[in-house]
Image (cartoon, grey):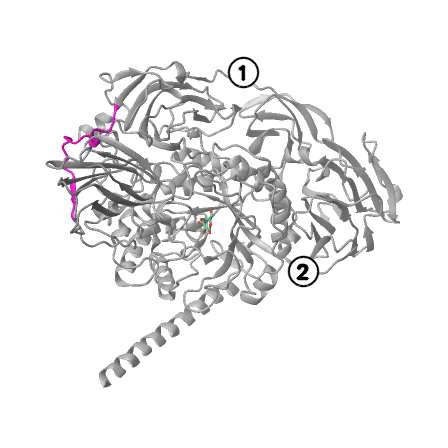
Amino acid sequence: MLLKGALTSISLAIAAITTVVAVPVSQTLKGRQEDNTNGDGQVTWDKHTIMVNGERLFLFSGEFHYFRLPSPDLWYDIAEKFKALEFNGISFYFNWGYHSPKKGVYDFDGVRNVQKAFDAAEAADLHVITRAGPYINAEVTMGGFPNWLINMYAMARRSSPENDANSREWLEQIDKFLVPNQISRGGNVILNQIDNEYAVNTDPKYMEMIKDQFKKDGMDVPTIFNDIGAPNGNWVSGPGSVDIYGWDSYPLGFDCANPTVWGTNRSIHWREANERLNPDQPLALYEFQGGAFDPWGGPGYDACRQLVNEQYAKVYYKNNYAQGATIQNLYMTYGGTSWGGLATPSVYSSYDYGAPISEPGLMTPKGYEVKLQGTFFHTVKPFLTTERFEPKSDNSDIILIDGLADVNTNTKFYIAQHWNTASEELDAFHVQMETSDGKFKVPHKGKLVLNGRDAKILVSDYDFESQHLVYSTSEIFTHQDMGSHDVMLVYAYEKEDGEIALKAKSKASKVKIETKDKTVTQSALKKDIVQINYKHPNGTSPIYIKNAGEKDLLLLVAGYSSATRWWAPIVDSKSGNRVLIHGPYLVRSAEIKDNSVSFKGDIDETTDIQVVVPDNIKSFKWNGKDIKLKPTGHGSWKGTLNFGRPQVEYTDLTKATWKFSQGSPESQPDFDDTEWITADHLQTNSVTVPDTWPILYADDYGYHTGNIWLRGTFNGTSEITGFNLTCYAGAASAWVIWLNGEYLGGYDVGNQDFTNLNGTLIDPEGTNVISILLWTTGHADDWDADDRYKQARGFTKSELLGVKNQTIWAIDWKIQGNLGGEDLVDPVRGPYNEGGLYGERNGWHLPGFPDDKWEDASIPETKNRTGVSWYRTTFEVNIPEGYDAPMSLKFDDDTKTRYRSLVFVNGWQLGRYANDLGPQTQYYLPNGILNTKGENTLAIAVVAVDEAAQVGKITLEPYTILESGIPDVKLVESPTYQDRTQH
Ligand code: GAL
């Protein structure tokens, strides 16, 4: 008793020491927050924003997963697109499992070279948020845990000697990249996340362990945490707490099947939560819904893009700003592809996500909307230091207006939204604006409206360039001093009224307006305030205003769709000076040199353009070529970018010569499986409880991904009437079964009886062989830290039927998965690229495999095929220099029999197709994996779930053709069949 008591007090003392240690640590961090507001290489913060090198900024970040785009040069392309859409940050998850096939083995080469992701971000001038877990969720298998962790005894996301050692092993490895890329070392990493949404079943010691390892390795940027779904206050203080707390939110959820149905669940209490929980920190949304993921059999990403559309971006993102958010990371901004076995069972290969940038890297209406918002708050600096106030307005039962007042100037912002987020009504309202020039009921003339799912940020009392804006009912895109005059671009939906009031330098009556727009009127709001009214046009109207500010003002009034095609690339990162260009599908960047502006960008058709530049600019280049533009006055020039007729060539696969081989010899009773692993485990580390023995979980035998084969043998007796099997695997998994070489059926996961087989298929006197092919869809995640990622992939039960004294080990089993198991035979393509199909194990998917002895076949297939069928062909793609034509492979298929297939291009498994589930039929083939200047190898493995399957039509198709400033994309190393067999 005494001894026990003593031990308890020792452990209490230890607990007390831990707590004491934790307090000074957080105080030190607070000290850093207060002391170094101007230091170089520093990230500091106050309640308004973070500051990077002393400079205040709205961190407008987008989520990107390098592991979902296996072509590092394309990371530069995506980073440029982030920049073009006015993101100034990029958030990276780092996927432990993607780098570690086996305990102690780490790979950061080739497509896994994360340094290139930092370099791409740096090249595009993006700040980086690092999120290295160890747990990341992200709809990746095991939530990013490595395959081998499944066989570790200790619980993940808990502190224990074993799990700490495993987590630290990963952190030490990834920190070799994170640490030197921090801003304090001259890199671009500014914030570092600790684990992910760790909010259920938590253990503060686990959080402290992660923080400790990061610190030990040299991480010194502020730590952050993304609370689950709402400001729940996890890790905001006490042990495990982080520097800048924040949360995630997905207000529209993931029901893309009802793409017009919005809730009314806008959060109006976040500001209060931020003030209560972490009043000295900015309001941070480390994941805010940028799209939605879609499950197997779901409605598809077009529907998600419609659900989480540009109107959503207006209404919900502006609400975030109204709540005071100045850190917002859109999850996803570019989704990419869960290629190979990267996905959890909850998603299929495409992870397009309906994001602002689509899977093949294309612009979307939401991308353009986001650009309008980003440009605004990177231009209008008073937006960064506001306090809330309550403005007076009418129609306030219908229209909610949040007021934000800058604490340093008189500038105020009014964020107007429908109270009912889903409202599709047209509603007018007035705002009472109290400015340093007096009180105004705005608008004075005409109507200020919200037309359906819209939200607006209105500005009053704002000094910009040499002007003073009293107020505007149009939203501001940007403004710029162009030397001889100022420019400002404003917008609203077409046909809506607009009203702008400007302070006149002397009298309102002296202000002169030049415009061809007949809707424009001018009046004096006050003696020294000019009021300009107009209708937002289809297009953009220039209004030239003299004698308002010190300089003349070129006011560009744009209708919404015209506004979406305005770009304001920064030409000088020091001053933040911008030029304006209208028209192109994408403007990646602009540079001024010797009185000439060079633009880099993409067009999708012949495009009329307008540029607005300083007076000294006399010539222009587009993607390195001179272009002729005509001056139209006030630094504005017009011209046309001609879309050439590119010879984009690619093989017509319906006319290609295909080779065919049967690929499931394992189904035959005489197949030699002596080399296979005998499944003889009696214990498992899985959280799935077995009903019979031996353990038939693939992971227990070192096979973690893709297809798994099992072969069971039993000696027949006259008693045995059949058998019973229970398959345990993720959603959309399937299994196909043979007995003594005869097809018995194809099934979803679950229990299945096979009866009345005696005398027909079961040989009562001989050995009987069951062959099972299990098509898996990845492992579960560990979202609520309960180790469910350790759920089985295999069979929980295998028993004979009709036997009186049933034993719990009735059938002997062998198991087969990918060649080498955790000892990868193809480390270049990594741990998720291939599974245990006969063809995969024998390199049939690889370029250079000699298929000349295979029989000829045609696709669409004309023969019924049972088991696994492999098809191979080669195809050409030729995309000329200066063009981007992201390619896809498309299935078009009306067969009634169910099948699954794996698509390998140049040996890389780029997609999984389930003709019975869908919804995905189109597979993105990223440049770099795809040779866009020559030959490619295509291999397709078709697993017939029903007895006979016929793969349908397969074609190549570009998503679009762009004349493009895309950076050079080099071919990714793709080892051949010969490379594999020579080793
Ligand atoms: C969040 C999680 C992300 C991702 C997202 C849904 O809860 O942090 O990793 O899973 O949900 O796409």
Q: Is residue 410 toward the left or the right of residue 57 in the image? A: right
* Residue type beneath disc 1: Arg
How crowded is the residue under tag 2: few (<14 C-alpha within 10 Å), some, or many (20+)? some
Query: In the rendered view, would you say 686 is above or below 542?
Result: below
Q: Is residue 931 toward the left or the right of residue 104 in the image? A: right
State whether residue 617 appears in this view.
yes
**Label for residue 388?**
2
Assign a secondary structure to mark 2.
Answer: strand
Task: Tell which of 939 and 825 is nearer to you.
Answer: 939
Assign a secondary structure to mark 1.
Answer: loop
Residue extent of the magenta highlight: 662-680
Mark 2 beta carbon near ligand 1 (under 8 Å): no
Percent position (x, y) of residue 338? 40, 38
- The magenta stretch spans residue 375: no
Percent position (x, y) of residue 800? 20, 45
Q: Quadrant of residue 917?
A: top left
Query: In the rendered view, would you say 7 is above or below 841?
Result: below
* Residue type beneath disc 2: Arg
The numbered mark, 1 or 2, whose residue comes first in the sequence reads: 2
Percent position (x, y) of residue 602? 55, 27
Residue for badge 1:
645
Look at the magenta stretch and give its main secondary structure.
loop
Percent position (x, y) of residue 542? 75, 33
**Label for residue 409?**
none
Residue at the image point whose x is 67% and y is 35% from the top: 563
